[in-house]
Image: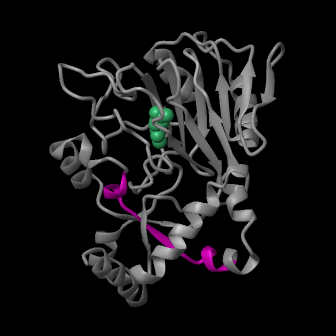
Amino acid sequence: MSGTTVQPVGYACGARVMGIDLSKPVSDDVAGKIRDAWHKHLVLVFPGQRIDPFQLVAFSRHFGELEDYASQPFNRHPDVNEVMVITNKKSNGKPSPTYNAGQNWHTDLSYTIRPAKGTTLHCIEKPSVGGDTMFANMYLAYETLSPKMQAFLDGLEGIHDASLIQGLEKRGPEVAAEYKRLNPPVIHPAVRIHPDTGRKALYVNERVRQFVGLSEAESKPLIKFLCEHSVASRFVYRHYWSVGDVVMWDNRCLTHLAVGDYDPRESRYMIRTSGKGDYLGRLVAAENASPSAQPTTSAKIAEGVAALED
Ligand SMILES: O=C(O)CCC(=O)C(=O)O
Ligand SMILES: [Fe+2]
């Protein structure tokens, strides 16, 4: 990447990449170097870009197949299926269903069986102040736990539930109901091994309701502890957006939060792609109904479901 620089912008994660024009085709060689920088810094910021949704898709495809957002059929870009619009701007006089997207700590699409691998977000309009996004390094969150807690979490699975999306109900009863219908609770490991780096990362966030095999009363304090621990300020990079930024992050080893710290009368307009996940979780319901499920697993899931229905 001659003429290109990668400059860390945060200690926990985050680097600024200068000298690449994303409106032009990116060679496989450059894409490989970007991937290496991404694995090292987890969040890459490409400032000063002017790209349309097609160019965003072309760039993002270098890092794998793209998500078609079938489980979130809201605010899709009218011209490009793989692009979601994250905005507070009304369309056809109706409030945007993504106006409050991402306002609790999460990792994208973890409430689906195939959570997004990475996400790329391009800022087209932003409020005069605020509208920031924060990212927490979940490798560090895991690595700073005691060995006993790490060993315990290594064997745990979390139930991720779309109904825990912050502000979902405020998007309107139809949007909320459709979201939940399309995204029934799913199970993922509490700790994931990143397929490219081999490092373990905590995979628990504010959209986890319970751990499989633990009661709700046992799960809740542990989830609370892990959520608080994982977003300690020393693990966090806060991105202050500028128009033209393209930010690409790794959902397998980060959680993130849209802070929502801006005047809602001002416009914020971002376009987004997500990479299809490289691993599959399991549906709580399917697992529970499957006759081939191991009795112990089945019983554990049933316990989880029963507590979910409390
Ligand atoms: O709008 C933002 O700052 C981030 C929203 C979000 O969580 C996402 O696009 O995945
Ligand atoms: Fe998100």
Observer-nearest residue: 24 or 210? Answer: 210
Instruction: Residue at 58% x, 18% y: name it.
Output: 242
Residue 180 location, quadrant? bottom left
**Above or below 163: residue 179:** above
Residues in magenta, as a range: 151-165
For the C terminus, the image quarter is bottom left
The residue lying toward the viewer, choosing from 19 and 29, is 19
Residue at the (57%, 10%) spot, across then down: 23
Tell me residue 308's x, y (percent). Answer: 30, 74
Q: Which residue is located at x 17 percent, y 20 percent?
A: 93
Query: Against 20, is 159 above or below?
Result: below
Q: Which residue is found at the position 34% from the left and 32% from the top?
A: 99
Question: With 99 as the anchor, is 204 left or right in this view?
Answer: right
User: Which quadrant of the rendered structure holds the N terminus?
Assistant: top right
Q: Position of residue 21 (x, y in %)?
A: 65, 11
Q: In the image, is 17 to the left or to the right of 130?
A: right
Q: Let me know if residue 159 is in the magenta part.
A: yes
Question: Would residue 292 be seen by someone viewing this image from the given angle?
Answer: no
| Residue placed most toward the observer, 245 or 100 | 100
Classify residue 143 as left or right of residue 288. Answer: right
